[in-house]
Image: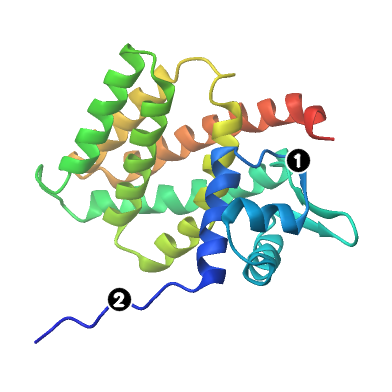
Amino acid sequence: MSKAPDKPVSSSQRALHELREKIFAGDLPAGSDHLESELAGLLNMSRTPVREAVLTLEGQGLLELRPRKGVRILPVSPEDMAEIYDVLTELESLAAQRAAEAGYDADALRLLTEAIDDMDVAIAEQDLEAWAAADDRFHAELVHLGGNSRIAGIVGMMIDQVRRARKTTLFMRPLPTQSNEDHRQVLQAIASGDATLARAVHRRHRQHAKSIIVSLLAKHRLRYL
């Protein structure tokens, strides 16, 4: 049976994807102002799909469309990030608990192990961007191993904002050596089937990350006003 051809990506979908990428990469930094015509030129497309993408991104809280003034890229607010981390903390901690209850063998936990090993190497080399990429892989795999598609869907809706906040604060924070130790303890708890410990350690880990990122965002928020 032949595979159905991939559905072509519309101009508005491409505009949405590329604008999101530029916002999260910092190419369109928080607090910056842009005309729709400028964004259309940047993406090399007409204004109509760009306008559709802008309206979608406004609904996602990434930018603000101001009449006669164009688009402003919104900063990541400490208040929003605190709320997001509260949700992520509970859902990911539940995923860690469920992963421990599932009785996974070492092969099933290989991606978690590899992510932690890569984070250790990144910290030894003081490569924070490599550490952040490996950290993303760890959390994504943890949620996957939790086996709950609804948790995965909700986390997926929020994780881009976490990445954006972390990109803003990545080089302001100390080396995340404690974060790596937390990850390894979560892995060990899952491997040993200790669901209570897996949930508790991961919850503590996310709460600590929240306190660091939210305090840094609050400290540096004036640069975006």
Relative depth, front residue between 4 and 195: 4
SS for callout 1:
loop
Q: Seen from this angle, which residue lies furthest bottom?
A: 1
Q: Amino acid at mark 1?
A: Ser
The residue drawn where x is 30% and y is 30% is 185
The residue drawn where x is 53% and y is 70% is 11
* Pointer 2 with pointer 1, Cβ within 8 A: no
**Which residue position is annotated with label 1?**
32
Q: Position of residue 57 (x, y in %)?
A: 65, 61
In the image: residue 188, left or right of residue 151: left
Relative depth, front residue between 70 and 126: 70
Label 2 to label 1: alpha-carbon separation: 36 Å
Rendered image quadrant of residue 162: top right
Relative depth, front residue between 8 and 211: 8
Quadrant where the C terminus is found in the figure? top right
Quadrant where the N terminus is found in the figure? bottom left
Q: Position of residue 14 (x, y in %)?
A: 50, 64
Q: Amino acid at mark 2?
A: Asp
Q: Earlier in the sequence, mark 2 or mark 1?
A: 2
In the image: residue 143, left or right of residue 192: right
**Which residue position is annotated with label 2?**
6
